[in-house]
Amino acid sequence: MSELHLTEGQLRRLEEIYQGLEEEYLRVAGELQFSCQGCPDNCCDSYFLHHTYSEWLYLFAGFMALSEEKRGEILRRAEVYCEACRRADAEGRRPQAMCPLNEGGLCILYRHRLLVCRTHGVPARMVRPDGQSMEFPGCFRCQEMVSGRSQGEKPPRVERTPWLQKLAQLEGEVLQGKRHLLPKMRKTIAEMLLQGPPALPTPFCRRHEATGGEDIN
């Protein structure tokens, strides 16, 4: 296995992507006069899946900056979270469990929170690489606000596409052009923390050479 890491330049670019999306979020939230303040819900119990190894590395960097004791507490909560998700899946329900990084209603890795965590709430749109457009209506509170608008009046929304394109380009560089060696990324925060930082597997040809032609599984 070959360890993956974010260079200082890649780290800055990822944070610039986050900043750009947050500015768009604030613009849309301002136009809608939307705020999370006083909301009875907590989005941290939503079942969010994350899709880039770059963000996994970013999250883990923040996690490793915590004390060993705090990391242990979080990993224990992550195990509880994953078990709750397995039970829900077995029962045919969408999982709903509190993120292991949430303490007292707040994220203890707020600076290192991921893209979905930063942008959930207001309406958004993205165009996939295959050209299909996807619309996100926002959280339940935002949807209630938007429903009161005049019929046919489209609410403002965050256009995620250019920022996700930048993230995809960064992802390719972080994976050193070897994305094909890794499974498709689709994990919760709890799963990422329990698995540890991602690494590139050694290609079969190199394993074969290293063992003098002997196959080791």
Image (spheres, grey):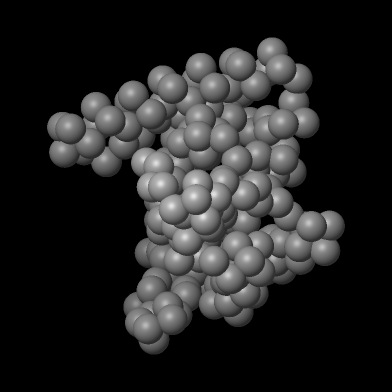
Among all residues in the image, which is located at the extreme bottom? 131
Left/right of residue 80 with respect to residue 100 in the rendered view: left
Total number of numbered discs in the rendering: 0
Residue at coordinates 58% horizontally, 22% vertically from top-left?
74
Q: Which residue lies furthest to the top in this view?
A: 69
x and y, in percent, of residue 150 in the image? 40, 76
Residue drawn at x 24%, y 27% is 87
Most foreground residue, 68 or 100? 68
Q: Measured along the vertical axis of the image, is residue 153 above or below residue 164? A: below
| Residue 186 in the figure: left or right of residue 162 | left
- For this orientation, the residue located farthest to the front is 212
In the rendered structure, the answer to whether residue 54 lies left or right of residue 88 reads right
Q: Which of 135 and 156 is in front in this view?
A: 135
Q: Is residue 200 visible?
A: yes
Q: Nearer the viewer, residue 212 or 194?
A: 212
Residue 189: image x %, image y %? 51, 39
Whether residue 15 is visible here, answered yes or no, is no
Return the residue found at the far right. Answer: 8
Residue 67 drawn at (x, y percent): 75, 20
Q: Up-down: is 197 above or below 150?
A: above
Please name the residue shown 52% across and 39% down the image: 192
> Where on the picture, by quarter, is residue 82?
top left
Vertical comparison of 36 with 160: above or below: above
In x, y percent, where is residue 52? Answer: 54, 57
Q: In which quarter of the image is the C terminus?
A: top left
Q: Which residue is drawn at the image coordinates 40% and 71% (left, top)?
A: 135
